[in-house]
Amino acid sequence: MSFDYDLFVIGGGSGGVRAARISAGYGAKVALAEESRMGGTCVIRGCVPKKLMVFASAAPAEAAQARGFGWEDATAGNFSWDAFKVRLDAELNRLEAAYTKGLEVAGVNIFHQRAHIVGPHEVELADGMRVSAKHILIAAGGRPYLPGIPGDDLGMISDDLFLLDRLPGRVLVVGGGFIACEFSTILNGLGVDTTLVYRGDKVLRGFDNDLRELLTMQLADSGIHVRLKQNPARLDKQGDQTRVTFEDGKVEDFDAVIFATGRAPYTKGLGLENAGVTLAPNGAVAVDEWSQTNIPSIFAVGDVTDRVNLTPVAIREGHAFADTIFGNKPHNLDHGLVASAVYTRPHEVASIGMTEDEAIQRGGVEIYDTRFRPMKSLFAGSDARVMMKLIVDEATRKVLGCQIFGPEAGELIQLVAIPITMGATKEDFDLTVAVHPTLAEELVTMRQPSRRHEAPAPA
Ligand code: NDP
């Protein structure tokens, strides 16, 4: 049977673009449909603009630190959202064009419109055109999830922040995950009166407990009004403000409410039922370790599969798919050991592998940890403490996890992820000569375990 294409990719985000480009490089005839801007969530309304906003928001604290080093008049001055926005838009346009160009050069046929599946080998485009393909790859990503309380449509989602004409004066951020922590940090740094409301007792559920405690304290210390064990119950319009009624009955008005209450796989209207593609109970496209659905010709990568919802994971999944199907190099991604970072300020949270809570459950581990005030911020008069922790298997001596709270912790975890992925032992870390004076040298100079968690007694 002959098809119009070897591969049709639905979604021009990180996973879809990588899969399309690599597949085309292997000689496959590839088409890709994207209904919005090329680059997807990460490039257009996620990681990239977010990190640029993190940099912008750090300027006042950096100026304060400069004063501590003797630059007595240092000040960040007035922040111009307009000036920043012009540069931000230009950068996103540049990146979007680069993504499009990369696909075009690779020979991928791009359809700038929505596509949905009509059968195991067929998709229909928004203009009604039908196209057949030997393989279909779903890379449609995720969408913010709203909590479903009355009036939640009055709130904003993180996507909206990048489109604002002006910064609101007083904002409520709802949630305690990646986006809530990062966006409340950004808004606070930019001078917005920011309140973070989270239903739990400390932010970043699922992360190492020490990281959670330290970040919760840092958010409050940096001037964000952190309200824990609290949640909005309803939103109402109140003139040009949003009136929030909290679950304990308190009522307060904000210029804007931002929901950062998680994301869900974007499968709506994809036509999965037309081909009989099975969904997981949480609504994600169900796939095996080869990113293959129950329909042999249909695959899925990235957030739409809700495995590990991070850009580099989607990229790896897309690349592995292309190598396997078109490159005659079958391999898949081990989702077990993926580093991540939360870009807060002044200190970031970064993590790979086992947390101490998991270590306690498992037993047979040593914990090496250290807390200290780094020389740079200490000199400038700050009391902020860094925390680094290694979790080591007592029997094999392998480093099973690393947890860091500190400046540029994301950069540190990227490097320490290499030996940990390679299976390095604590003794390999000990053999490594420190680079002095750095923050990261602490990772190779922790000699004595701070505590041990015993293996559970045999039943
Ligand atoms: P997260 O899953 O990280 O956090 C969602 C937060 O919303 C949690 O604190 C959760 O609370 C809370 N929540 C969920 N439902 C409700 C509700 N009904 N009412 C009140 N609170 C609720 O999602 P995010 O939206 O922060 O981010 C989405 C994903 O995007 C992340 O999981 C991550 O994969 C990715 N991301 C990665 C970044 C990075 O790598 N730096 C940055 C930004 C996003 P609870 O914990 O109690 O369930």
Image (tube, rainbow, N blue to C red):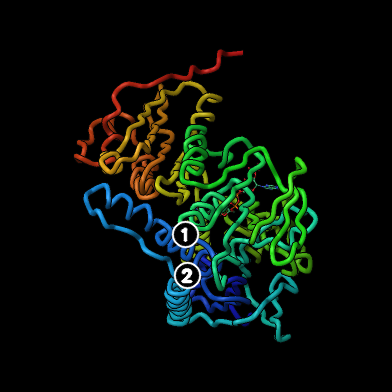
Distance between the Cα atoms at labels 1 and 2?
A: 9 Å
The residue that disc 1 covers is: 190
Is there CB contact under 8 Å for labels 1 and 2?
Answer: yes
Secondary structure at badge 2 equals helix
Residue pointed to by mark 2 = 81
Q: Residue at x 69, y 81 (%)?
A: 125
Residue at 60%, 76% in the rendered image: 36
- What residue lies at 40% left-to-right and 39% top-to-bottom? 404
Classify mark 2 as within 8 Å of ligand 1 or not, answering yes or no.
no
Residue 158 location (% of width, % of height): 59, 61
Estimate how packed mark 2 is, as few (under 14), some (14 to 19) or many (20 or more) residues with alpha carbons within 10 Å: some
Quadrant in the picture for the C terminus = top right
Give the left or right position of residue 367, taking residue 379 as reference. Answer: right
Disc 1 residue lies near ligand 1 with CB under 8 A: no
Viewport quadrant of the N terminus = bottom right
Identify the element where label 1 is drawn. Answer: loop
> Could you say where residue 87 lies in the image, as x and y percent from the top left?
42, 74
Which one is in front, 126 or 6? 126
Query: Considering depth in this image, is 129 or 352 the residue closer to the camera?
Result: 352
* 10 Å crowding of disc 1: few (<14), some (14-19), many (20+): many
Q: Position of residue 294 (x, y in %)?
A: 70, 57
Drawn side of residue 85 relative to residue 260, left or right? left
Identify whether 373 is placed above or below 197. Answer: above
Residue type (three-letter) at the residue carrying disc 2: Trp
Mark 1 vs 2, N-terminal side: 2
Q: Position of residue 118 (x, y in %)?
A: 75, 74
Residue type, numbered disc 1: Leu
Which residue occupies the extreme front position in the image?
73
**With respect to residue 76, does 417 lie above or below?**
above
Question: What label does residue 211 carry, if any?
Answer: none
Q: Is residue 261 visible?
A: yes
Going 52% across and 70% down the picture, which residue do you hit? 44
